[in-house]
Amino acid sequence: MTKIATIFAAAVALLLVGCGTTTGERAGSSALFGAATGAAIGSLSANAGKGALIGAGAGALGGYLFDQHEKGNID
């Protein structure tokens, strides 16, 4: 059951990445979803805190890069 929950959380995070219209909104929402997904995955190995931190960082970076791509600054 935990594998299904983890896959579902990752799919939801990927679908919602980049929600918002400004760079800050997109990076912030992506960081939030990344932290939630990272905590869910990290809890499987008893490291929810580390998973949340890694997920938040990866989410923020992904949201920022998505925003820059949408603006045409990145090919």
Image (tube, rainbow, N blue to C red):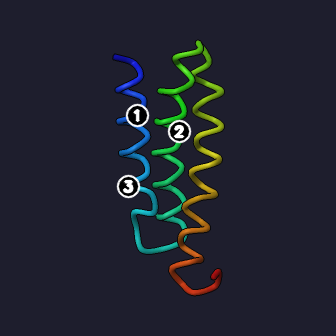
Q: Name the amino acid, label 2.
A: Ala
Tell me the residue that label 2 is attached to: 35
When the figure is inspected, residue 36 is found, relative to residue 72, above or below; the finding is above
Give the x, y percent position of residue 75.
63, 82
Give the x, y percent position of residue 56.
59, 43
When the figure is inspected, residue 22 is found, relative to residue 34, above or below; the finding is below
Sequence-first tag of 2 and 3: 3
**Is label 3 in a helix, a strand or a loop?**
helix
Q: CA distance from mark 3 to mark 1?
A: 14 Å
Q: Name the amino acid, label 1.
A: Ile
Tell me the residue that label 3 is attached to: 16
Which mark's residue is nearer the viewer, 3 or 1?
1
Residue at screen point 64% across, 57% down? 61
**Is label 2 in a helix, a strand or a loop?**
helix
Tag 2 and tag 3, C-beta contact below 8 Å: no
**Is label 1 in a helix, a strand or a loop?**
helix
Camera-nearest residue between 3 and 64: 3
Q: Is residue 73 left or right of residue 26?
A: right
Sequence-first tag of 3 and 1: 1
Crowd class of label 1 (few under 14; some 14 to 19; many from 20; radius 10 Å): some
Residue at screen point 59% across, 54% down? 60
Q: Quadrant of the N terminus?
A: top left
Give the x, y percent position of residue 36.
47, 36
Crowd class of label 3 (few under 14; some 14 to 19; many from 20; radius 10 Å): some
Crowd class of label 2 (few under 14; some 14 to 19; many from 20; radius 10 Å): many
Q: Is residue 21 left or right of residue 39?
A: left
Tell me the residue that label 1 is attached to: 7
Q: CA distance from mark 2 to mark 1?
A: 15 Å
Camera-nearest residue between 26 and 9: 9
Q: Quadrant of residue 45?
A: top right
Q: Residue furthest bottom?
A: 72
Q: Name the amino acid, label 3.
A: Leu
